[in-house]
Amino acid sequence: MKKGIVWIAAISLALAGVTGEGHHAEHKHWGYKGEVSPAHWAQINPKFRMCKLGANQSPVNLNRFIDAKLPKLKIYYAGIAFDVVNNGHTVKVNTKGRDEVVVDGITFTLKQFHFHTPSENTIDSRQYPMEAHFVHQSKDGEYLVIALMFKEGKENKVLQKLLNDVSPKVGEVKKLHEMFNPGELFPKKLDYYRYDGSFTTPPCTEGVRWIVLKKPVEASRQQIVKLHKIMGNNNRPTQPLKARVILR
């Protein structure tokens, strides 16, 4: 059993996924290059104004730390990853089943997870070749994102289960032949950083709790390159911390 994760045998609840970090399906005309790049998101649509005006935007460079006694991360994943799609912005994996995280006494349910190449958040200015975002939502509509960094190393057998089925064709949903529990991607040690931020995609909604796992996991160069060929550079640049600090 992985430290900090309680595996529950029964799968009892089917959940509908959200797109991207909650909003990719609404607006498909923003992107990462040229006139639709992050620098122009606020001008593309009035609903995206927070991308420019927000005070607590993500991603960030985690470097203004305050030591804190952060509680153990309580992750209860009993569901599965069951299909994968290139939605034009990212490779997104839909999940179903009871996948929950408890933070601040609030239960957040996993909706989906997706990838960015290279990483969006950086740690002491270090950028990783890939980052996964596990997007959770509470029953009251609050969001929590767990960020997992990937470094280049040996082949990641769990990651390969979705790479075997992902299609480079935008919008083509592929069922995973080898379904797996999303928590299998996490490292055994779940120490983390925490900060308050936003979605990293339009409309850049704030009030998102961010958990960034300190320990990266490995993926082979071939695996990272395959995802990068499908997604391209889909990382929003880091945003100013302003008055925020990073808890560790």
Image (cartoon, rainbow, N blue to C red):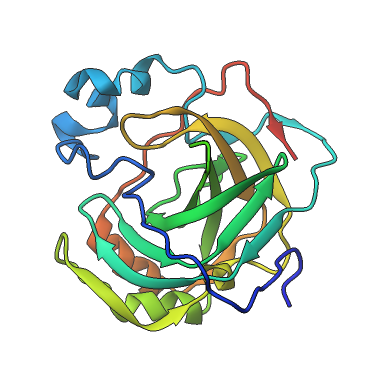
Can the viewer see residue 87? yes
Left or right placement of residue 62 versus residue 224 in this view: right
Image coordinates of residue 29 in percent, x first then y, are 14, 37
Q: Is residue 155 visible?
A: no
Image location of residue 124, percent across then percent down: 62, 39
Instruction: Give left or right: position of 66 versus 110.
Output: right
Res 169 → quadrant: bottom left
Q: Is residue 76 above or below residue 31?
A: below
Q: From the viewer's side, name the closer residue of 4 and 43.
A: 4
- Taking depth in this image into account, of 98 and 130 the one nearest to the observer is 98
From the viewer's perspective, is 203 left or right of 8?
Answer: left
Q: Where's residue 8, x and y in %?
A: 65, 73
In percent of the image, x 55 and y 69: which residue is there?
A: 185
**Looking at the picture, does residue 19 appear above or below residue 229?**
above
Q: Residue at position x 82%, y 35% from top?
A: 67
Please tell me which residue lies in front, 46 or 43. Answer: 46
Q: Residue furthest front?
A: 12
- Number of on-image labels: 0
Up the image or down, 177 lies above or below 46; here it is below
Residue at point 79%, 52% (across, down): 72
Q: Residue furthest bottom?
A: 177
Q: Nearer the viewer, residue 16 or 216?
A: 16
Q: Quadrant of the C terminus?
A: top right
At which x and y percent is residue 184?
A: 57, 73
Please tell me in which quadrant of the rendered image residue 244 appears.
top right
Report the residue at 36% width, 56% height from top: 17
